Image (cartoon, rainbow, N blue to C red):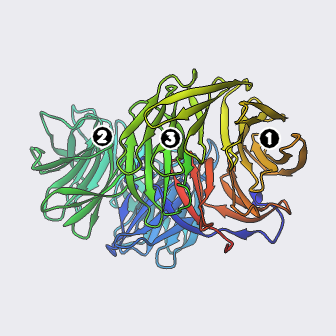
Amino acid sequence: MDDKISPEAQVAELELDAVIGFNGHAPAGLKCHPDQEHLIYPLGCTVLIQAINTEEQNFLQGHNNNVSCLAISKLGEYIASGQVTFMGFKADIILWDYKKRELLARLSLHKGKIEALAFSPNDLYLVSLGGPDDGSVVVWSIAKRDAICGSPAAGLSVGNATHVIFSSGTIRVWELDLPNRKIRPTECQTGQMKRIVMSIGMADDDSFFYLGTTTGDILKMNPRTRLLTDAGPAKDKFSLGVSAIRCLKMGGLLVGSGAGLLVFCKSPSYKPIKKIQLQGGITSITLRGEGHQFFVGTEESHIYRVNFTDFKETLIATCHFDAVEDIVFPFGTAELFATCAKKDIRVWHTSSNRELLRITVPNMTCHGIDFMKDGKSIISAWNDGKIRAFAPETGRLMYVINSAHRIGVTAIATTSDCKRVISGGGEGEVRVWQIGCQTQKLEEALKEHKSSVSCIRVKRNNEECVTASTDGTCIIWDLVRLRRNQMILANTLFQCVCYHPEEFQIITSGTDRKIAYWEVFDGSVIRELEGSLSGSINGMDITQEGTHFVTGGNDHLVKVWDYNEGEVTHVGVGHSGNITRIRISPGNQYIVGVSADGAILRWKYPYTS
């Protein structure tokens, strides 16, 4: 990361306040720490340590690409995390000290991806398995922080501490021969059954291990004889495969399916004794202590807490599982904010990171949102060409403007008198809508842009607005006479635009990575800054005083700029996807950035207003 931050030594780091996000796709990515007080899970290139009973979060940052797997040592002293990287490059495993929350060692041998990690029960060794391009198993000594031995696995995933490894046709048990620094595999016999294994669970006393398959059944294997003990269920197999298995001390299994069914069952029949349906395919089941309570993570980025006795789920954390396209605060308050991603609009409580409301329009994509100034409606732009307005307390649909644009609505803004909505479309039209009590009327269609409108900002007195477009123009419109006032041309796809609070200048940015200041009056360029070293700048917001502004983009960095000096004062490192939009909260308490990996990051605003 160091090469990306500009050479000025006086750039300070932004303080990360909170993260809303969980990558539910990492198999067994959600872990409960042996102290029973913390959940540990991946989000992008960060590992999050979340206190179960309080809002406290810690972040382990050191990976330069997405975290693909996690393991915690038996006593909980160490955490190991593996990452993906580009083909042919080394993928790192990082060993962390849990108590100090710091990096102990970087273990690099595998290429491409770390598929799975497991600590030995005596906490002396770590076993790792490379991804499909690598395919080797390595045993590391934790004390020496070095590889003891390694050997090709012909496998795709590592099992538990007896060094069980499985792959699409072969299931292997590995034995560690320390004096000779070797690991020796033996194949397991499953007879006529051919299965592709998705998940694995080891009994506490190591007497058996269980394999979950894509077919939706469970194989019980004996690691000593290497033979299949039993398999089931014979009928009613688990839909979309058995994606997670956890053995309980008191006997029996917790099983999660790709269709989101969570079941308690026992060998040999594997018939459901208790079951509940959750949202999203289950990828993790992790026990708190002996399993009187456990946590479940799903592909839709939900984390549930389940008490074993009554087998009822409580949703404890949610977040977007698609790229977040927009973030907006209501007028004058930082208590709430709204985000949109794919089919969802969600309203969040800022300080507690809790989701207050979810509005879903199935099979559609929401490109932009804005609050009316009176706070009575959320106006949203959708790819089916409709503008939809929802009540922010209940999520009730208030009205729809049908066929507002031909190629989807791509940007939206409201006027502060709550009488107009200005929308931009994929075809480049800017449309002004009159919003009455019961009616929504098209006032004017302004046809100047040749390509999609990416951002709209309205002047405070509602007499003028500016629209940025990917055709390389920004147009300043007169909203009284409904015509063009001024046009700004640059060799870039404009992604974002802001009025300076005094409203005689605007700042723009886009794919050419330049931040440009323009004169509103005649459209001339005042100055240009180098906004980032790599990748487009997609989001920008300015404080109410106009002294500082923030930007975010494809270099994953949040930058705070001094408006007059044109220099970066603070940088925030934490996003692991492209930052799509960014906002400063009213009252300058927080900066909230949203990114393409579904994460929402809240930073402390570095200056006191």
Dividing the picture into quarters, in which one does residue 170 lie?
top left
Residue 154 in view here: no
What residue does disc 2 label? Answer: 258
Q: Which mark is residue 419?
A: none
The relative height of residue 313 versus residue 477 in the rendered view (above or below) is below
**Viewed as shown, does residue 581 lie left or right of 216?**
right
Discs 3, 2 touching: Cβ within 8 Å = no
Q: CA distance from mark 3 to mark 2?
A: 35 Å
**Viewed as shown, does residue 398 lie left or right of 335?**
left
**Dot 3 or dot 2, earlier in sequence:** 2
Which amino acid type is shown beneath numbered disc 1?
A: Asp
The relative height of residue 122 versus residue 391 in the rendered view (above or below) is below
What residue does disc 3 label? Answer: 379
Which amino acid type is shown beneath numbered disc 3?
A: Ile
Q: Residue at x 24, y 35 (%)?
A: 239
What residue does disc 1 label? Answer: 512
Q: Residue at x 60, y 41 (%)?
A: 413
**SS label for mark 2:** loop
Q: Nearer the viewer, mark 3 or mark 2?
A: 3
Which quadrant holds the C terminus? bottom right
Which amino acid type is shown beneath numbered disc 2?
A: Gly
**Viewed as shown, does residue 269 lie left or right of 560?**
left
Dot 1: within a 10 Å radius of its alpha carbon, few (fewer than 14), some, or many (20 or more) residues? some
**SS label for mark 3:** strand
Q: Nearer the viewer, mark 3 or mark 1?
A: 3
- Measured as percent of width and height from the top left, residue 80 is found at 48, 64
Q: CA distance from mark 2 to mark 1?
A: 42 Å
- Measured as percent of width and height from the top left, residue 224 is found at 23, 55
**Dot 2 or dot 1, earlier in sequence:** 2
Discs 3, 1 touching: Cβ within 8 Å = no
